[in-house]
Amino acid sequence: MASENNQDLDSLALEFLKLVNDIIWWGDLPDEVRRDKWRILAKRVMSSSGDDVQEFLHNIIKSIAGDSFYVTRRLGKELEEYLKKVKSVGKEKELIDYIKSRAIPLVIRLSAERGET
Amino acid sequence: MLLYGVIARTQEYFGGLPVLAEITHHQLIVATTLASSKASFFAGLLHDVLKPLLKFKKSAKGWQWYHLDGLEVGNTKANLEEIFKRGLSSILSENDIELLVQLVRQHHQRDAIRYNPITFAENRSGLGIAIIEAALFPRKDLERMGLYTCIEAKGLTHPYHFFVLTLIYQGIKYYLNKVYSEIFSSLGLSKLIVEYNFGSEKLPEIQYDDRNSVLTIRYHVPSILFKDLKVTHEYGSKAFFSIEKVGAKNIKIYHSWSDILTFLVPSPSTDGLVYKVLCVIPRIVTYNNKGVTIDSNAISLFEDRVQEIVNNVLTEIQESVKLDSSYNKVLLGYIEGIEQGNFKCIFCWKRTNRKVELSRGRLLSEKFTDYHRIQIGESVCPLCHIGFLYEELLRKQGPAFYLPLPCEINSIDIADDFRQRYLTYGTCPLNPKEGVALSVLGLSTMQLMSEAWYISLLKEIGGKSSLPSWVKVYALRAQKNVNEFYVKFLIDRKVVIYPLIVKIRPKALISSYGGRNKKFVLNTEVLEGHSLWRGSELDITEEHLDMLESLTTTLKSSAYKRIYGKLVSFYGLRE
């Protein structure tokens, strides 16, 4: 049973992956990457790192999309809000560990949420 | 969630701790001991036929579970005679039905132990076979309570030892099923079908098909929570436990007779903790006009059959790994804790007088890399030798092989709709707050629960000729072979023995995974902790499955196959 603490981390983790997924322009990437996008996303989340959440996010996106990503005004705002929220919770290291160690189930849940199972 | 059945009993002592005993299993165990006559056998099989209505009342004596004549069900009062006459007239004579009705009606009467075989079989002062449902270490002499000890294993100190013992247990189960089948068929029962229809309360229906010797019991279990769901158990000569014909609202679970009547349990002794393979002695209780007694002759006749079976199983094991026949006796000796000789086994350090060549060209092939698992020694003991060779054999057969072990209980709860019924009393007939009480039957039920979970992940593939017929080899289920039930159960690991809802941690001895290059019995402890199945990318853990649990309430049926596909691909389960 997830504790209250874990529930906080869980929703922050899912939100993090939503942002990563939205920032990457999957449509610009090669077919074979697009077809396998969820597995690639999970693997890259597991293998990436960062000193803080922003760097972690940047490294994941870069490892998948190189320079092929755009942050629209709406996404930029969402990202800013998100990073503020993470800072206010004050558990960045824990959040990064949580996301990395549970990347597969989180990505599966995100894909189900997006109706792309 | 696996809807499995209905509880057989509540625990009188220790504050109403639940025990994992299923009602059909309980009746079958009692019936087996009474299989000396048709009337008493069927009486045993049906004596608690009203229990699945779960009619509890609290009195000054505590909770009472009413399940005899006169029980109010809907607008009618239960009449056992009517139920049995309607269902059994094509198998039992009128006199036998009358006798059966009388035996069932009387089985809770004071002093019934003197004249009623059901009471005698169940009661501690008689045979007391029902003790195995509530206790793990019965204090009575096992044989005097109707349990035969097929094998007593002492001094098991290495995973290979337990691997070999579990293999032997599987073999004994397989052959004992034939013995039970033969006995039950001679009484007119080739197959038992039990349906649990969840929803509104109704009297049970019994039907006997005399052309095929099939008895069907249709229970109607009152439950709003599981309304319209149905689970069917089939017991018979089919040798293996399996879950098939899985629909959106119903599933069918196949059991062998010996899934219920054979046990592998720890047991305390003067030699420390030993492991025993036990089975229920059929026909041990005899009943006539003079009263009820234990039939010693039935014990000795059964003993001969069991000894023959044990020898067959040992021979088959030894032949499949191509060892010479002298290994049989030695193997049994080592299982029983006898060790002889001056060579030390490199795996377990037991002594042996057999010199097994260990060089890379011999036992330890060039592929052997687990040098951190061996100790200084000159040979291997017969138990480790067979365990090692068997593991190699199974690994080469691939892709997956496992022996289910009793699961662990992560949590136990009571269905909300059941609890609601007793709100006015302020307490409930069952108290799951402090977990579950272990018992002999509970342990084998927990083993079936583990097996059920692995069935949701693995599918049996065709047998290999080099293996005995009771050894099954598996492969990971293909996406086309899974459905909503398998994937949901794989993720949530919940089993319902109504009204108990149990969350399990499945356990097994796994000797090969995925491909053909991994072996794990020797490395058993790598699985301890929380890993449930290994993947080339990442192992599946309870923690990860817990994180997916929210999907089981939100996904459409059509999405489960794809979720399963993702699990297999992301974790690398097939490699």
Image (tube, rainbow, N blue to C red):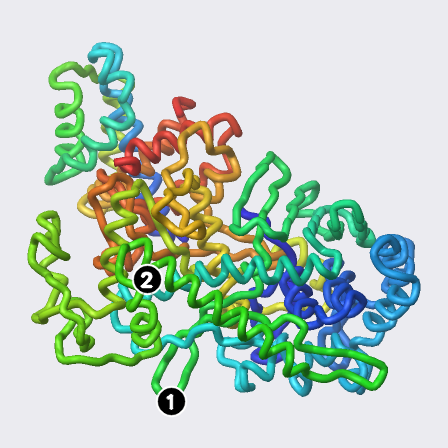
Q: Earlier in the sequence, mark 2 or mark 1?
A: 2
Q: Is residue B342 left or right of residue B434?
A: left
**Above or below, B115 relative to B346:** below
Chain for disc number 2: B
Q: Residue furthest front?
A: B325
Answer above or below: position of A92 versus B156. above
Residue situated in front as seen by the camera: B79 or B282: B282
What is the x, y in percent for residue A99? 25, 40
Numbered disc 2: secondary structure: helix
**Position of B402 relative to B157 (above/below):** above
User: Where's residue B65, x and y in %?
Assistant: 74, 69
Graded by Cα atoms within 10 Å as few (under 14), some (14 to 19) or many (20 or more), the crowding at tag 2 reads: many
| Residue B120: percent from left, percent from top | 72, 81
Read off the residue under disc 1: B270
Report whether residue B547 is seen: no
Amino acid at circle 1: Thr
Residue at 78% of width from left, 65% of height from top? B38
What is the quadrant of the C terminus of chain B in the image?
A: top left
Quarter residue B10 falls in: bottom right
Name which residue type carries label 2: Phe
Give the labeled residue for mark 2.
B163
Q: Label 1 lies in what chain?
A: B
User: Which residue occupies 46% across, 38% down?
Assistant: B487
Residue B140 placement, left or right of B310: right
Residue A31 visible, this angle: yes
Q: CA distance from mark 2 to mark 1?
A: 24 Å
Asked if badges 2 and 1 are on one and the same chain, I answer yes
Residue placed at 69% from the left, 44% from the top? B227
Q: Nearer the viewer, residue B85 or A66?
A: B85
For mark 1, give the secondary structure. Answer: loop
